Image (cartoon, helix red, strand yellow):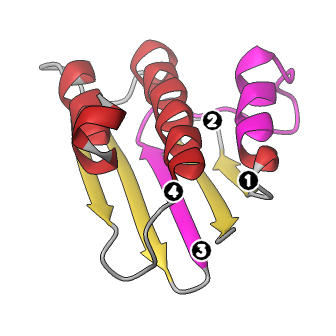
Amino acid sequence: MLADFGLQVALDTICQQLASPALRWHCHVELAEGPAVPAVLQQAVYRLVQGLAHNVALHAQATEATVEVDALPEGLVVRIEDNGCGFDPATVRQGLGLMTLHRYAAVLRGVVRMESAPGLGTQILVRWPWP
C-alpha cells in the first residue's frame, strides 16, 4: 500500500480499516510544507501508526481517535490521540508495544512524548528531524 499509493493513502486506509460504529477515526496528513519524506521515514511512520492505531482499537475503549502527520520545516511530526480509558504511564509495564514505539522512533533519531491518565485518553507525539 505504502509503495503503491504513498503515505497519505496508506494512513487513510489504516484509519478506514479500523473505523467502526463504536470508534470514529480522523486522519489528517499534511506533507506539503516540508521536504519530500524519505522512504525509510515513510516506512517508520507507517509501521508506527499501524501499531498504535491497532492498540487504540483493541485497548483504549475510545469512541474518537485522531492520526495527524505534519511535515514541518524542522522535521516530521506524528500525533495519535484518543478519548479512551487512558492509563498511568508511571505504572504501566513497558511491554512489546511501547518498546516497539520507542525503537521505531529512535532508529531515525525520533523523540517520543506520551501523555495519558486514567479516564482521560492518550496522546502520543513522535518528532523526527529531517535526515
**Disc 2 marks which amino acid?**
Pro
Tell me the residue that label 2 is attached to.
118
Whichever of labels 1 and 3 marks the residue nearer the N terminus, that label is: 3
Q: CA distance from mark 2 to mark 3?
A: 31 Å
Stretch in magenta: 75-104
| Element on which disc 1 rests | strand
Q: Position of residue 83 (x, y in %)?
A: 41, 41
Does 85 sit above or below residue 31? above
Q: Is residue 5 visible?
A: yes
Q: Position of residue 62 (x, y in %)?
A: 37, 29
Q: CA distance from mark 1 to mark 3?
A: 14 Å
| Element on which disc 3 rests | strand
Query: In the image shown, does 32 or 16 lie closer to the viewer?
Result: 32
In the picture, the quarter occupied by the C terminus is bottom right
Tell me the residue that label 1 is attached to.
112
Q: Residue furthest bottom?
A: 73
Residue 44: assigned label: none
Whichever of labels 1 and 2 marks the residue nearer the N terminus, that label is: 1
Tag in front: 2 or 3: 3
Q: Specify few, some or many for label 2: CA neighbours under 10 Å numbering under 14, 14-19, or 20 or more.
A: few
Q: Specify few, some or many for label 4: CA neighbours under 10 Å numbering under 14, 14-19, or 20 or more.
A: many
**Disc 1 marks which amino acid?**
Val
Q: CA distance from mark 1 to mark 2?
A: 20 Å
Tell me the residue that label 3 is attached to.
75
Q: Is residue 45 left or right of residue 67?
A: right
Q: Is residue 27 left or right of residue 121?
A: left
- The answer to whether the residue labelled 3 contacts the one labelled 4, judged by CB atoms less than 8 Å apart, is no
Whichever of labels 4 and 1 marks the residue nearer the N terminus, that label is: 4
Tell me the residue that label 4 is attached to.
78
Q: Is residue 63 visible?
A: no
**Disc 4 marks which amino acid?**
Val
